[in-house]
Amino acid sequence: MSEPKNSSQDIEMNMTDHLSELRKRIIYSLLSFVVFFIAGFIYIREIYGFLEDDIPIQLSVTSPGEIVWIYFTLASIIALIGSLPMLCLQLWLFIKPALTPKEKKVSLAYIPAVFFLFIAGLAFGYTVFVQLILPFLLSLNDGMFNELFTVERYFRFVFRVTIPFALLFEIPIIVMFLTSLGIINPELLSKIRKYAYFVLIIIGTMISPPDFILQIVVAVPLILLYEVSIVLSRVVYRKKLKAHQEFMEDVDDDR
């Protein structure tokens, strides 16, 4: 009768240890976010000046609340970008005990890739907005209206374009990770290619103005990302098959 009790106690202790470890990782991630948030708040003028220099319009505010909004929003974006590597590292440290030595080494390489792809997506989305989308929208006015651009509405529109790009640029990493877990494979990705294209084109039309050329400019990089994801999935899949084959050969040799 004592064995089930001990087993129950072991399970309870393991759950407590896991929750304690998860809490520690969350705390470290939040501390990193707070540090970068404070840094973003301190350098808000420089950040705002850098972003405003790229546009040919003067932004205005209609209430004190907009000033507070832009401070907290830009600081939060900086904190999100800056703390992303720490968040990924803490997630990796949490799942690390369940990984094999080879899996630990491979999965650790995903952390800088996630960060740089996120930055690349933001940069690409922002460049598309400043160089293509904004000039196109301003050209529609052609002197018909008095232009008054408020800070809040302008940056909401910017984030609506740039944040989706930052997330979509993570597709190759997500595909590689899911392939390594055996959830998807390059054959499946090739089969659903036309459906994936359709979804990506819809996303492109949602985050770009109703102009055919601009929608193509936005959709083409997303389709290229998907094709790159298929190539990377093949690489991961082949390595996985090779590792499995070597393992089976070792088992046969032991027999």
Image (cartoon, helix red, strand yellow):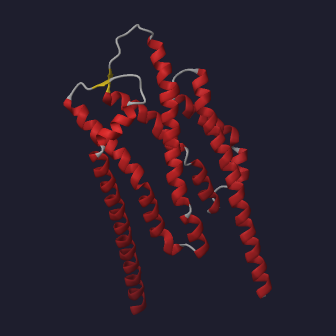
Camera-side residue of 229 and 57: 57
Q: Residue furthest left?
A: 64
Image coords of residue 178 (percent x, y): 60, 57
Q: Name the residue at 28% across, 51% down.
A: 38
Camera-side residue of 251 and 48: 48
Image coords of residue 128 (percent x, y): 52, 31
Is residue 241 shown left or right of residue 58? right
Counting labels gives: 0
Q: Name the residue at 51% across, 33% down.
A: 127
Camera-side residue of 91 and 147: 147
Image coords of residue 236 (percent x, y): 68, 60
Q: Name the residue at 25% across, 32% down.
A: 66
Vertical side of 127 occupied by 121: above or below? below
Is residue 209 shown left or right of residue 219? left
Q: Name the residue at 60% across, 21% down.
A: 212
Is residue 207 visible in this depiction of the protein?
no
Vertical side of 93 occupied by 62: above or below? above
- Quarter of the image where the N terminus is located: bottom left
Vertical side of 205 occupied by 94: above or below? below
